[in-house]
Image: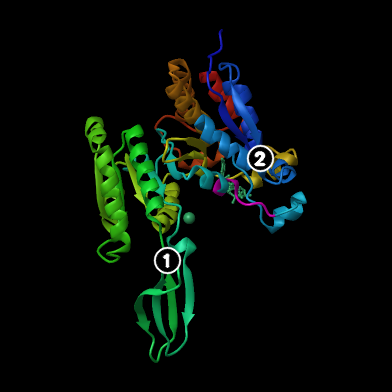
């Protein structure tokens, strides 16, 4: 058989622990036999990040900018324990944060839906895709305790330090309490809006953006207005694609999404996105079935699994014990990247291969072969689920592929 040709390389970002093991297996079992794989390889494994003083992460992000499509394995974000475990020179920053900063991207989390795996909200038969604006608001807020009797103001200064505005936040009078000030930047909100409209179009999914502009009239009103303004650039394309954009209040959005069949792209402000992405992920069952795509406003893509490096399984693997780690989200990171590369380079055979690999993966589970995390979630008449170990599952997918 002739292998499927590629034109432009994928940016391949290797990672850590159990997902690094999966990475190699997936390539060998499911991709290399069929695709003449071209990648530009970056090793983001913690050891190599340390050896390169983390320049490898920056280089990989710049390569993603250059080529437009990257696929990333989960990586360790070091904490104090990891610094001693790996003897690190420094507590390097989260690679995801570094890549997101360089691409100025928005993260979209999308569940992989499979027949037989019933979400906790049974009407969600299609994916609820969540977009989180990962800049500002609560996450870079200043918060302070107010002293009894204190009057707290919000004060603005111009470049020369002259006061240009002063508003009373609260007169604490005889009371104590707390105060918080937060900000956002129009350019960041605009980038977020572009990424959301673009992604909705690509997936042909209706978009909801929600905030609380009835209460935060200026702050959330700015988000609403920027989204409305940016939408004008996409209005025609949305009509042609037969999808809609709706701005609504966050409480109304929650009600709409819960009552829906899924099939919605839900764009959230930073805090709402933090909370709701965990709610959506939990509702779909397993972290092993959640993918994540970083999209930049100028259309660069980085695909990955939403879960981490599955450390607990890795330590079992190191001891020679059997593991049953779900590789589905990592397989879909690869297929997402290959599909996108195929579309951009006009290679239908590559896109078609990626879809076949996704179908084979879904079918493996639907026919009852799955990793341990999915067993309690699986309910299909006439099919009794069989627990596969990590490699058995990949071979079961390969058989169907
Ligand atoms: P995790 O790797 O997502 O794993 C947490 C638990 O979720 C696992 O112990 C396992 O539960 C279950 N799980 C997650 N993915 C699974 C899969 N594919 N198959 C089966 N079960 C799965 O999160 P963590 O343990 O908090 O973090 C581990 C490391 O990953 C940390 O160093 C963190 O910095 C990093 N991390 C990286 C990323 C990223 O690169 N995007 C994201 C998050 C975390 P059971 O143990 O009960 O089986
Ligand atoms: Mg959260």
Count of marks overlaid on the render = 2
According to the image, label 2 marks what residue? 56
Residue on which the image places disc 1:
182
Question: Could you tell me which residue is drawn at 72 percent across and 46 percent down?
Answer: 50
Q: As drawn, is 70 to the left or to the right of 122? A: right
Q: Relative to 26, does residue 271 appear above or below in the rendering?
A: below
Decide if ligand 1 comes within 8 Å of the CB at mark 2.
Answer: no
Does the magenta-highlighted stretch encompass residue 95? yes
- Highlighted range, magenta: 91-97
User: Position of 149 compared to 76: left or right?
Assistant: left
Residue 173: x, y in percent?
A: 38, 90
Q: Residues within 10 Å of mark 2 (few under 14, many from 20)?
A: many
The structure residue drawn at horizontal position 61% and vertical position 42%, both measured from the top left corner, is 58
Q: Residue at coordinates 37% horizontally, 39% vertically from top-left? A: 127
Q: Nearer the viewer, residue 68 or 358?
A: 68
Location of residue 113 by image quarter: top left
Categorize mark 1 by other alpha carbons within 10 Å: few (<14), some (14-19), many (20+): few
In the rendered image, the residue lying farthest to the right is 87
The x and y percentages for residue 55 are 66, 43
Between the residue at mark 1 and the residue at mark 2, the CA separation in whole angstroms equals: 33 Å
What is the number of the mark on residue 2? Answer: none
Q: Position of residue 326 (x, y in %)?
A: 56, 37
Q: Nearer the viewer, residue 379 or 12?
A: 12
Q: Element at badge 1?
A: loop
């Amino acid at each position: 058989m002739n292998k499927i040709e590629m034109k432009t390389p994928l940016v391949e970002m290797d990672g850590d622990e159990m997902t690094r093991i999966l990475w190699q297996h997936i390539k060998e079992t499911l991709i290399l036999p069929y695709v003449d794989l071209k990648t530009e390889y970056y090793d983001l494994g913690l050891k190599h990040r340390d050896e390169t003083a983390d320049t490898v992460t920056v280089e990989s992000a710049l390569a993603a900018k250059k080529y437009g499509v990257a696929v990333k394995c989960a990586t360790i974000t070091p904490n104090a324990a990891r610094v001693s475990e790996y003897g690190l020179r420094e507590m390097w920053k989260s690679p995801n944060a570094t890549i997101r900063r360089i691409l100025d991207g928005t993260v979209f989390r999308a569940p992989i839906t499979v027949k037989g795996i019933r979400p906790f909200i049974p009407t969600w038969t299609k994916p609820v895709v969540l977009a989180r604006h990962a800049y500002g608001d609560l996450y870079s807020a200043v918060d302070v305790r107010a002293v009894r009797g204190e009057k707290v103001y919000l004060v603005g200064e111009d470049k020369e330090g002259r006061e240009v505005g002063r508003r009373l936040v609260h007169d604490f009078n005889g009371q104590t309490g707390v105060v918080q000030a937060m900000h956002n930047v129009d350019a960041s909100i605009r980038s977020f809006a572009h990424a959301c409209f673009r992604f909705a179009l690509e997936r042909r999914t209706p978009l909801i953006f929600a905030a609380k502009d009835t209460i935060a009239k200026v702050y959330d009103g700015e988000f609403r207005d920027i989204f409305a303004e940016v939408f004008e650039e996409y209005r025609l394309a949305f009509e042609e694609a037969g999808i809609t954009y709706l701005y609504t209040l966050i409480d109304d959005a929650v009600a709409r999404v819960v009552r829906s069949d899924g099939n919605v792209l839900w764009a959230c402000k930073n805090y709402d996105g933090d909370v709701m992405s965990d709610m959506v992920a939990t509702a779909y069952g397993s972290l092993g079935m959640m993918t994540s795509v970083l999209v930049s406003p100028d259309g660069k893509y980085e695909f990955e699994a939403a879960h981490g490096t599955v450390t607990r399984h890795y330590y079992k693997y190191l001891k020679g014990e059997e593991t049953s780690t779900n590789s589905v989200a990592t397989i879909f990171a690869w297929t997402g990247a290959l599909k996108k590369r195929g579309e951009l380079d006009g290679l239908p055979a590559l896109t078609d291969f990626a879809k076949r690999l996704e179908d084979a993966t879904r079918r493996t589970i639907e026919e009852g072969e799955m990793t341990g995390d999915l067993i309690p979630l699986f309910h299909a008449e006439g099919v009794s689920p069989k627990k596969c170990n990590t490699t058995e599952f990949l071979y079961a997918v390969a058989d169907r592929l």
